[in-house]
Image (spheres, helix red, strand yellow):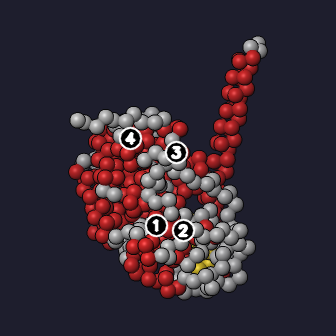
Amino acid sequence: MAKKRRPPKDLDQLDLFATEPEDPAPTLPAPEETIHLSGLAAAVQTPPEPEPVVEATNVLRSPRQQRARIDRIAPTSLAERIAEAWHRQHAGDGIAIPMGIVATLVLLRRTAVDGTDVAEFVLSLDKAELVKFHRHVWATLWMRQPYFVACAYPIHSWLMDEDEDLPAKVVDAIHAVTHTAITGGLFNITGDDDPAMRSDVDMLGTLLTNLRSEGARGALAEIHTPPELADMMARLLITPDDYEPGAWFAEPAAGTGGMFRAVSLAMRLQGMNPANFGWHMAELDPIATACSAVNAIVWGLGPNVLIFCGDTLVTGDTVTPAIEFRQGVLDHHHEVMSRFAIAQATRQVHALVTMLGVSD
């Protein structure tokens, strides 16, 4: 007997991922206070005033927890399957769409706040509902994390125009890639509630490598540091005695943020909290930059994150434009949310007046 399809819940009532609102005033780095990850060797001089220290939780120390770490083969195998599912649909030559589809999914946890099994819920949606679902995730995230959503625009912009229907082949591709990712075990890699477990793999970086041709990677000088090497470097150089909360780390060729993944994981393994530090990522490629913004959420890097997209060899100061862009995004978000609050209050007053029978 065929399994009865469970009707989807109202997306507006389903909280699929819990994130805190952004801090509108991050602690900003000074050049001499920044740890440049090119060699991971620069010392921190006088660090800025730190954010209040948050006690690290879920530190991976026991043998049982260590054995639960992600199999390194699984992400590569899954990325190959996702890339194959995308290309089989012949929905276009660009990679922004499949990267955006998977970026939506890596933002989710296995279980929603209300206990809903997220994989079961998403797989129950038909194609039209699935498009709405992907849009809903980004719209909800913009309410809570506008800066990261703005930085990730290159991989979700194709979803934003709700007045224009997506081509049928793209809709089919969204369905195929989403199902391939979920049934292939994506949530086992990125869906854990513990950010330490989510920080074991750069799933978006692995997928980007699979979707891009060797020629394209060469033209972009795109070389992702092997995760094993990044982990080894981070474990050797990151210790609580060397880095105080409030210090900033900078990467001038961040890619999708793989080195920061390793550093944040090394911190958690030693009882440190990455949210107590600052992270500045600069990258030339817009797609990789967008992925680094999503990864900042997935890996729990905290509120003090600055992202710059551009040529760092041409732009010497990448901090100032990153700060200006971030502030512009937050100002716009504040304006929109203020208007929304006013409109909502007006509707509530109107409803109350109507209920009381007060004439105009």
Give yes or no for contact between labels 4 and 1 (Cβ–Cβ under 8 Å). no
> Mark 4 or mark 1: which comes first in sequence?
4
Between tags 4 and 3, which lies in front? 3
> Residue flagged by tag 3: what amino acid is it?
Asp
In what element is the residue under mark 4? Answer: helix
Q: CA distance from mark 3 to mark 2?
A: 22 Å
> Mark 4 or mark 3: which comes first in sequence?
3
> Residue flagged by tag 1: what amino acid is it?
Met
Give yes or no for contact between labels 1 and 2 (Cβ–Cβ under 8 Å). yes
Q: Is residue 68 left or right of residue 39?
A: left
Q: CA distance from mark 1 to mark 3?
A: 22 Å
> Mark 1 or mark 3: which comes first in sequence?
3
Residue where numbered disc 3 is placed = 114
Residue where numbered disc 4 is placed = 130
Q: Residues within 10 Å of mark 2 (few under 14, many from 20)?
A: some
Q: Is residue 121 left or right of residue 51?
A: left
- What is the number of the mark on residue 58? 2
> Mark 4 or mark 2: which comes first in sequence?
2
Q: Residues within 10 Å of mark 3 (few under 14, many from 20)?
A: few
> Residue flagged by tag 2: what amino acid is it?
Asn
Between tags 1 and 2, which lies in front? 2
Q: Is residue 168 visible?
A: yes
Q: CA distance from mark 4 to mark 2?
A: 33 Å
Front residue of this view, candidates 283 and 263:
263
Q: Is residue 140 left or right of residue 3?
A: right
Q: Residues within 10 Å of mark 4 (few under 14, many from 20)?
A: some
Q: Is residue 146 above or below residue 167?
A: below
> Residue flagged by tag 4: what amino acid is it?
Leu
Q: On the rendered image, what quadrant is the N terminus found in?
A: top left
